[in-house]
Each structure stands twice: as C-alpha cells, then as structure tokens.
Image (tube, grey):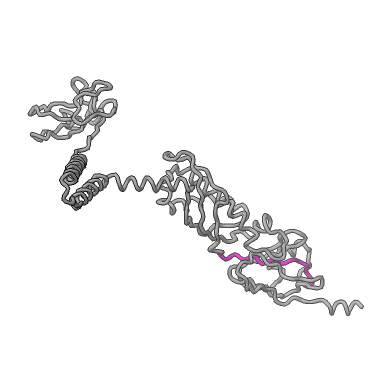
Amino acid sequence: MGLFSKMKRQLLEVIEWKDSSKDTLVYRFPLTDRDEIMNSSTLVVRPSQVALFIHKGQIADVFAPGTYSLATENIPFLTKLLSLPTGFNSKIKAEIYFVNTKQFVGLKWGTQNPIMMRDADFGNVRIRAFGVYGFKVDNAKVFMEEVFGTNEVFTVSGIESQIRSILVQGFSDAVAESKISALDLAANYQEFSKQILDCSQEGLGKIGLKLTSMVLENISLPDEVEKALDERTKLGIMEDKMGTFTQYQAAQAMRDAAQNPSGGNFASMGVGLGAGVAMGQTFAGALATENKPREVQNTCIKCHAKLKANAKFCPECGAKQTMECPKCGATITAKDKFCPDCGQSLKNTCPKCGSELKEGAKFCPECGEKIANGN
C-alpha cells in the first residue's frame, strides 16, 4: 500500500506560467495534494514576472526572472522553515504564485462626481476630468500582502477602482494647489498630468504599485459656465467690431431708402428724402462714435487712484502728476525716464558714483554718499 501511494505522487519537473491573457496580474500555479517539489525541479520565471513561494501563509522566497534548478541554496528561507536535511531529498509542499510585472497601459480614469474648485471669475465651480493612465506591480511581496491575498487569479479589474480613487484624489490636490482659473485650465493639462502622477505615487506605493504614465485628456465645466464663456467670447469679438457693424447697417438702410420707388407721389418722395436724411444722420453718428478716441485712464503715482488723461493732480490724494525737466523746463511725468524735448536723463542718481537711487533715498546704496534733501 505504501509503495502504491508513493507511485501516485506527482513529481514536479518544470514550474512555469505561460501567460496568454492581457489583464492577469497574479496567477497561482495549480498544485494538488499529491504534487511535490523535489530536488532539481526547474523553475522558469519569464521576463516581466516574479515568482513567490508561500508556505503556511508566509512568503518564503521571491524569484526574479530567470531559470532556476531548485536546490537548498536557491530556496534558503523555505528550507529553513521546513528544517530540511542537507541534500534536499525530502518533498516540499508550498504554494507558488506568479506575479505579472509588465506595464498595463491605456486604462481609463475619471471623476465620478464633480469636484468643487474656487475660481476668481466664476466663484465656486464644479469641474469634471478624465484621461488614461498606465501602471505596473513594483513590489510583488507588498502587493500580495496588501491586495490580492491568496486568490487563484487576480486581474486588472480587481484593482482599477482603487487606482482611480487615488488618481481623482491626486487631481483634486493638484487643482487646489495650482490656484489656476477655470479659463486657464485647458492650457495646463501637461502640468496637471505631472502633478497627478507625483501626488499619486505615494498612495500606490503603499500597495506595491507604481504609476508609469498619466495623461489628462479633458477638464469639463458645467453647461451654464460654458455658456457664460461662449457669451464672453462673442462680446470680446464684437467689442471692436460694433462700430463697423453699425456703419454697415446704416449704409444698408440708406441704400434701401434710395431704392424705394416714389411712385410719382411728391409726398412719398418727401418721406423718402426724410428717411434718407435720418439715415444719413445715423450714418454720421456711427462714424463719429467709431472715430471718437477712447478715453485713457492713468493711475496716480502716489495712491494709484484712477485718473483721467492729462490730469495734473490726483482727485483723491492731491499729489501732483506732472513735473518740469531740470534742464529745459519742459513738462514731464513721473513715468518718464528721459525728457521728451531735450533728452535729459530723469533718473535719480548719486552725485558721487552715479548709481540709480530710489525715491526718497537718504544715502547711496553703493558708495554710502549722503543725498542732499533725502533725494
């Protein structure tokens, strides 16, 4: 009976995993109660794979890609656990897991619910975002301990939701820290992608994973905000074209009035003439409006209050806005660096070394010369 039982034992000669799937992360090598790993069994770990030997719930040994002839020196920790005699002639019972360490790319992520951001133009705005990412198993031992446990097969779908949650959290942090307005979000996709990748690495590292790529494809705003942006764009386009548009309308009206048949009726001719005169006045008014120079506003050199063009004194603080050139007496402003009439330099300079001085300086910052009148 003992001899018959011994013959039924299956001696494993080659242990390997030929992965034909596209989304398998972990595969447990099938073992039965009769399977035994004996001396000189061959373990084949293919590229982008890691093999884990598990004994009684403990990770005994980890094998990187390569071909191994299993012997005492190749599985030292498992040998120590089993207290095998030298020579490795006894059977070994252990579970074997193959972990896929290749990159999984083209996976989609997105915000399931809108994220609130504070915007200077629109106030509190809800935004959504989506894109694609890639990841890989960076630490097979940590990944087993924290995620897949002892499942026979573990696929990408089993970890996708957790990765998406970490990415959305990284996106929220990136938006909050950037303080970029909603109008400028589209111009910073690449920067956001890098920030999301950096923010998410720590969370993924805790479960043995690594984010290998991160692409932010789109950030969308609520419909009402997008409509407001569209209206603002239209107004911006029409702002400079409104005068031309008015002129065009007036010209069209004059042409229509001139083509209006009088029918030989002097009264209707008078009406036509009156309409023509009115249209002419409208056209002239449009031209005057278009050609009228826009009022330019300046700011006070002292309190920065808004000033009308050519204002000599500030209506808020009373500060004088114009000065005279020390050489020719021409009127100059505080912003002028040279006199527009004689070309005299208007910079406040040290009389000793010629260094430029700040307004109100009492000493030269370069040579220490005392400035008369603190000027």
- Quadrant location, the N terminus: bottom right
> In the displayed structure, would residue 308 be above or below residue 38?
above
Q: Position of residue 84 (x, y in %)?
A: 78, 66
The magenta stretch is 87-103
Q: Is residue 2 left or right of residue 33?
A: right
- In the rendered structure, does residue 98 fall within the stretch colored magenta? yes
Query: Residue at image x 36%, y 47%?
Result: 233
Q: Quadrant of residue 296?
A: top left
- Quadrant location, the C terminus: top left
- Whether residue 82 is visible here, answered yes or no, is yes
- In the rendered structure, does residue 372 fall within the stretch colored magenta? no
> Depth check: 303 or 71 in front?
303
Query: Residue at image x 22%, y 46%?
Result: 250
Q: Residue furthest right?
A: 1
> In the displayed structure, would residue 293 be above or below residue 313?
below
> Depth check: 225 or 164 in front?
225
> Depth check: 249 or 353 in front?
249
Q: Is the stretch drawn in magenta largely helix, strand or loop?
A: loop
Q: Is residue 30 left or right of residue 125?
A: right
Q: Position of residue 364 (x, y in %)?
A: 22, 27
Q: Residue furthest front?
A: 265
> In the displayed structure, would residue 168 be above or below residue 86?
above
Q: Position of residue 367 (x, y in %)?
A: 22, 29
Q: Is residue 121 left or right of residue 68?
A: left
Q: Position of residue 318 (x, y in %)?
A: 24, 20
Query: Residue at image x 53%, y 63%?
Result: 106
